[in-house]
């Protein structure tokens, strides 16, 4: 380690080569940012009529939605150099290094104006100061102070525009948002179905797709996917295509790539034995309950091929872009999630249930708690009992959380318990009533390793009448990610 020698470690690209056409599915953000391009290209137009050009724009949105790409596209469209540095790099540095790096960056930028400075993950340095929990981070504060000083130090028409990105605008120091600093915010959200389609369009420009592959159906299958996920998906599909020595990407590569992006790499299936049977019953339990409860999303497939951490998975087809979720649907989801454990218990007995349901149990607890504390769906009535933001952040939120009295907290626990116990009872009854059907499904699943939704339902309907799925028609767009399979 060398002390005192700070090498400027920011990045400069003379030309990013990125254009607005390369960023898709975020039309509103692009419109807002179009003006920034004009500021950089023809500042006179604004200054001649006395308008103050904004210095800073804050891009707000989840990871992978294209914030970095947008910043590069602004520089690319305006034809100015792109300077960038990331907030997270400062946090572990020696005191003083971050501040001097910021100073260097602005010095270089001024020499190269007009230009664009991009600060990624600004929340890493720009957190609310002085909250006093976990000890003040001097380095962070000094870096932040230096940044504020630099921003105040140059005139609005110096030809430098600073774009910062974060997914936590709520934790940012309010000093950053004052006029003359980051006084504009542009949100960059996960794309809706139309957005996903246009992102897929952008990313398959340089790829060969078989004619039967419909980008629209890929877009429909990927709610919750960000631009980065979609880029990754098409790339995985292309890699699989090359590995299989095919000429063009077909549906089978797309399918495999979707699974891989969502759930991780495939592993080797277990050899037949007691634990494979147990996992089979667990998965069939999820899928059967999901099929028999009307409000549950329909089964897409059940598989015993391990993926990522999971030994088996059940996939459900989510309702496209659903914004509102009813009480019956949440209850259905709780029951479906408990279906795995209920099946284990029904077949192998109370003493033999396994840790395999750990993730399910956690999810059930979280769903039931939200019914009580956020959505007013319990006997405690339509009262919000918790701040919407669940994370504890540097003192600020800690206060609001302890507002709940012990008595109310105990009532919440009781209400959560009641929901879960009642759902488990119903689930277990359902599983017990369909034991024969379940045995048949398990035998078939062990034989074939994967059953798709139609095969699964065909068997179930030999034993019982499947209720019609009661689904909402899409009202508003959203980015629900109920696409995640159940282990
Ligand atoms: P963020 O900065 O918001 O985390 P990035 O801009 O780094 O996201 O996105 C990573 C990659 O994902 C991009 O380089 C691009 O290939 C792809 N991508 C993300 N969002 C989009 C989008 N809206 N349009 C096209 N490609 C995108
Ligand atoms: Mg980024
Ligand atoms: Zn499970």
Image: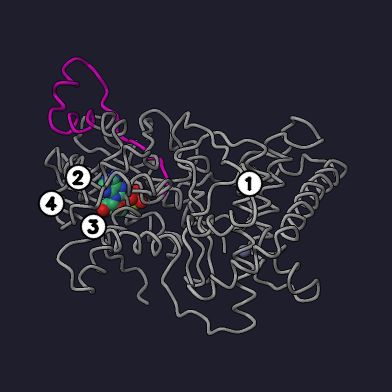
Camera-side mark, 3 or 2? 2
Left or right of residue 178, residue 419 in this image: right
Q: Earlier in the sequence, mark 3 or mark 2?
A: 3
The residue lying at 19 percent from left, 29 percent from top is 39
What secondary structure is marked by label 2? helix
What secondary structure is marked by label 4? loop
Q: Earlier in the sequence, mark 4 or mark 2?
A: 4
Residue denoted by label 1: 390
Q: Label 3: how many residues lie within 10 Å, few (<14), some (14-19) or many (20+)?
A: some
Q: Quadrant of residue 396?
A: top right
Residue denoted by label 4: 14
Residue denoted by label 3: 11
Left or right of residue 116, residue 305 in this image: right
Specify start and end residues of the magenta stretch as a single range: 34-62
Q: Which mark is residue 22?
A: 2
The residue lying at 67 percent from left, 66 percent from top is 358
Split into 4 quadrants, where in the image is the N terminus?
bottom left
């Amino acid at each position: 380690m060398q002390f005192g020698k700070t090498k400027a470690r920011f990045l400069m690209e003379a030309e990013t080569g990125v254009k607005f056409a390369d960023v898709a599915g975020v039309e509103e953000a692009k419109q807002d940012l179009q003006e920034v391009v004009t500021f950089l290209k023809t500042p006179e137009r604004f200054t001649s009529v006395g308008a103050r050009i904004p210095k800073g724009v804050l891009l707000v949105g989840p990871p992978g939605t294209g914030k970095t790409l947008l910043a590069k596209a602004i520089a690319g469209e305006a034809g100015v150099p792109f300077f960038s540095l990331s907030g997270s790099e400062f946090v572990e540095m020696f005191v003083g290094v971050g501040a001097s790096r910021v100073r260097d960056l602005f010095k270089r930028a001024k020499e190269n104006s007009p230009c664009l400075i991009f600060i990624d993950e600004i929340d890493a340095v720009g957190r609310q100061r002085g909250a006093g929990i976990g000890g003040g981070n001097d380095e962070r504060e000094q870096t932040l102070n230096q940044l504020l000083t630099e921003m105040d130090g140059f005139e609005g028409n110096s030809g430098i525009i600073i774009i910062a990105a974060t997914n936590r605008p709520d934790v940012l120091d309010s000093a950053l948002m004052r006029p003359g600093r980051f006084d504009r915010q542009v949100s960059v959200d996960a794309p809706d179905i139309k957005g996903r389609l246009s992102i897929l369009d952008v990313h398959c420009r340089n790829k060969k797709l078989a004619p039967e592959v419909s980008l629209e159906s890929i877009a429909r299958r990927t709610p919750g996917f960000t631009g980065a996920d979609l880029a990754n998906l098409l790339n995985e599909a292309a890699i699989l295509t090359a590995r299989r020595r095919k000429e063009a990407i077909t549906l089978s590569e797309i399918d495999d790539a979707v699974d891989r992006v969502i759930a991780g790499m495939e592993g080797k299936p277990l050899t037949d034995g007691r634990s494979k049977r147990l996992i089979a019953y667990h998965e069939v339990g999820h899928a059967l309950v999901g099929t028999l409860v009307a409000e549950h999303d329909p089964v897409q497939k059940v598989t015993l091929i391990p993926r990522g951490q999971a030994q088996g998975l059940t996939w459900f087809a989510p309702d496209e872009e659903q914004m509102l979720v009813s009480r019956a649907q949440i209850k259905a989801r709780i029951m479906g999630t408990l279906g795995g454990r209920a099946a284990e218990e029904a077949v192998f007995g109370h003493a033999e249930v396994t840790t395999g349901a750990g993730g399910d149990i956690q999810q059930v607890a979280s769903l039931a708690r939200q019914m009580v504390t956020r959505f007013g769906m319990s006997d405690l009535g339509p009262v919000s009992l918790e701040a919407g933001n669940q994370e504890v952040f540097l003192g600020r939120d800690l206060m609001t959380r302890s507002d709940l009295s012990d008595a109310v907290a105990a009532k919440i626990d009781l209400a959560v318990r009641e929901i879960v116990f009642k759902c488990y009872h119903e689930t277990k009854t359902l599983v017990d009533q369909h034991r024969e059907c379940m045995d048949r499904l398990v035998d078939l699943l062990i034989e074939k390793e994967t059953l798709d939704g139609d095969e699964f339902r065909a068997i179930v309907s030999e034993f019982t009448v499947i209720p019609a799925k009661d689904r909402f028609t899409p009202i508003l767009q959203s980015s629900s990610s109920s696409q995640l399979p159940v282990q």
